[in-house]
Image: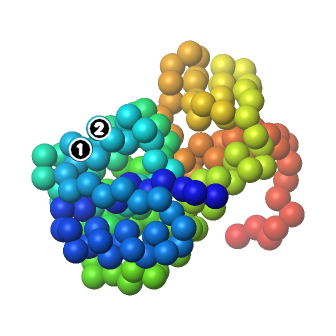
Amino acid sequence: MNTRILVVDDDPTVSEVVARYLERDGHEVECVGDGAEALRRALARPPDLMVLDLMLPKLDGLQVCRKLRERWPVPVIMLTALGEEIDRVVGLETGADDYVTKPFSPRELALRVQSVLRRARGASVTGGTGVLRDGDLVVDVGAHEVRLRGEEVLLTAREFDLLAHLMRNPGRRSAGRRC
């Protein structure tokens, strides 16, 4: 399965290393160096996943992530030198699916990409397309859209997958242990 990954980093060396590792794993990789161009390309043709630096020219990574989430639930892995807890929390609250700090292991990043892609595909692999309804809540699995009382609800890919799973399995109790 050929997946498209958009790598967004203003450091060409970082982009090149990340691209090389991801291409080695069979992904199609496109690299861009600023936030505005990344957003333009992602909205024109949404990638399967985005590796996104936070500190970018023209439009920072948090703004790119927010604007992307307004339109499409593309999985995002933040890759940045900002490693303080508050930076990670803000990145994850903005909608990132994972957060990797520089310096980083390219192999670990490639494995995290596989993991995030596997989770993002979970709903579509098990559930296919269709529309799920529960009262005023409508989940369009094929379009990756959620509406509540007619208003669009913006969710991360992980949140969307979880909601779709819960709606497909109403009333089902977990067989696992309670914590």
* Label 1 packing within 10 angstroms: few (<14), some (14-19), many (20+): some
Quadrant including the C terminus: bottom right
Q: Are marks 2 and 1 in contact (CB under 8 Å)?
A: yes
The residue under the point 65% across, 29% down is 140
The residue singled out by tag 1 in the image is 37
Distance from Cα at disc 2 to Cα at disc 1: 5 Å
Q: Amino acid at mark 1?
A: Glu
* 24 with respect to 1 (left or right): left
Query: Residue 18, percent across and down?
Result: 36, 72
Placement of 85 over or under 126, stated as above or below = below
**Residue visible at 18% across and 46% down?**
59
- Res 92 seen here: no
- The relative height of residue 153 versus residue 24 in the rendered view (above or below) is above
Q: How is the image coloured?
A: rainbow
In what element is the residue under mark 1?
Answer: helix
Q: Is residue 56 visible?
A: yes
Percent across and percent down for residue 102 are: 27, 77
Residue 160 sits in quarter: top right
Q: Callout 2, which amino acid?
A: Arg
- Horizontal side of 146 relative to 169 (left or right) equals left
Residue drawn at the location 54% of the way across and 67% of the way down: 26
Residue positioned 28% across, 68% down in the render? 15
**Crowd class of label 2 (few under 14; some 14 to 19; many from 20; radius 10 Å):** few
Image position, residue 118 (x, y; %):
63, 61
Indicate which disc residue 40 carries: 2
Q: Tell me how many marks there are.
A: 2
Looking at the image, residue 177 sits to the left or right of residue 102; the answer is right
